[in-house]
Image: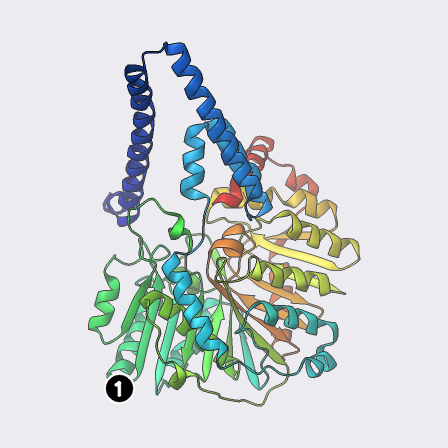
Amino acid sequence: MDKLFKKIFSRFPLVALTIVVLILLFFAAVVGVWYVGAYILAEVYPVSERIVSIVLTLLDDLILILAVVNVVSRNLVPETKIPWILCIVVLNILGVFIYILFSSHRPSRRQRRLYKELYTQDKATPEQSISEDKLRGEVGHWADVGRALSLSEMHAVVRGNTAVEYFPSGEAFFARVVEDLRQAQKFIFLEYFIIEEGKFWNTLLDILVERAGAGVEVRVMYDDVGSMGKVRAGYYKKLKKLGIKARKYNPFVPVVTTLHNNRDHRKILVIDGRVGYTGGLNLADEYINETHPFGYWKDNAVRLEGEGVYNLTRMFLGMYQLSTKKVEDISSYLVRHSVESEGYVQPYGGGPYPLYERHLAEDVYINMIGAAHEYLWITTPYLIIDYRMQQALVLAAKRGVDVRIVTPHIPDKKLAFGLTRSNYMTLIKSGVKIYEFTPGFVHAKTFLSDDRVASVGTVNLDYRSFLYHFEDGVVMYNVPALKDIRRDFEETFEASALQTEEDAKKSVVWRWLCEIAKIFAPLF
């Protein structure tokens, strides 16, 4: 009963209820103005009700036509245009106002202005990547993936002299992070979508407080929506009292705006500019399997030591400055540290347009799919993909590439799981092998191809990651850790069930409901 009471009166449902009320009041006001205007028109100009009705109908039709023309002509993702047109046609004026309120997912003008200032500052000190010829000489045609990414994202510089360690579970990651944090001497930066009080976070927090007391600068940034219900609204104030520079990104307030869609979904940890981590893991107990809300939680992460950490440091400081809305001198944090190691790494960040190129993270994946010759193995918690991603996977399978995708068997969100399964049939018929991880939930976002290239990061195969969220990842070329990633895939396949066309046909009613929901998936 206590648990139910806490859920009902926690911050999330109260905020959601407030927003619903605000939306209803807004639309009530709009409808009221519309009909009051009609009444005043009839009173001021003594004309028949029929004429007033004709005028209002013509005005209504004109507004609908203009709205549809606007949808068609705007630089929107193609998959979003049909659902917006349907919304306008079916809901009439109400649909138009929904479109006006929710069709834009651009960051605020202030954010765009600040990002431009940060971009100008960074452009003054351009990065030097390894030469394209050198990369091509060692990784062949895979150099094209790195070139395309570096042209799209200024900070996505290909780095050598970086040792990579791969963690196939949250438990392994946890042990290594604790060890590294205790060695911090200058600064510690953490940027995570979710933090939640429990064994995992509390253990790290004790070390952060101890290191802060020893003079180490500690900065922590977490996403407000991601951590909603995990920590209380003013948790960052508690961290500040403990000597930590804490921020919650894009604080959620009960105002009707699409700016709340631009969440910070990144997972970055940097220690002294020497060691950096990223991957799918958030800082909550289910990620290290201390709790089991969805069976065994399958996740991963990578540890970089060397030059590649420079990219992660810049990404963190860029987001931190977006959060504080202040540009600072970051030169003292941009440490260059080299470790002799084979291969190359390319840490990168993506985010909402126009701060980043549209589809940047999706383009990385599609370029990897297109470059694969022998095999392409993928893990993803969600498979809610657009047409071009679907066709890239289909074409890879048709040209003989061994394409395998691992998704969860136990879902964390039933609708997302239904949308994921609704994509099975087309892919399976084209030769893509789809596995469901039977012990529980797969949260890892991993691509591995031809024993030459891999990507580990935060980017899901869904619209939110591709269009709205700030994300990060690292593409790795010929690093020794690729063998560990391959071994993890092989073990994951053994623990998973291969899906067939018969499996994809199950539950016809639910499948059709998901097909309908898929039409509107790009909007949310």
Residues 172 and 275: in front is 275
Q: Residue 44: x, y in percent?
A: 28, 17
Q: Is residue 289 visible?
A: no
Q: Residue 48: x, y in percent?
A: 37, 9
Image height of 185 relative to 446, above or below: below
> In which quadrant of the rendered image does the N terminus lie?
top left
Image height of 401 relative to 185, above or below: above
Image height of 372 relative to 478, above or below: above
Q: Is residue 160 visible?
A: yes
- Side (left or right) of 257 relative to 70: left
- What residue do we see at 64% from left, 45% from top? 424
- What residue do we see at 25% from left, 47% from top? 6
Residues 328 and 314: in front is 328
Q: Quadrant of residue 116?
A: bottom left
Image height of 15 relative to 381, above or below: above
- Side (left or right) of 141 relative to 79: right
Say which residue label 1 marks.
214
Q: Residue furthest left?
A: 241
Q: Residue furthest front?
A: 45
Q: Residue 259: x, y in percent?
A: 39, 52
Query: Is disc 1 surrounded by few (<14), some (14 to 19) or many (20+) residues within 10 Å?
Result: few
- What residue do we see at 65% from left, 72% from top? 147
Q: Quadrant of residue 150?
A: bottom right
- Under mark 1, the amino acid is Ala
- What residue do we see at 65% from left, 37% from top? 505
Counting labels gives 1
Q: Residue 253: x, y in percent?
A: 29, 50
User: Mark 1: which secondary structure?
Assistant: loop
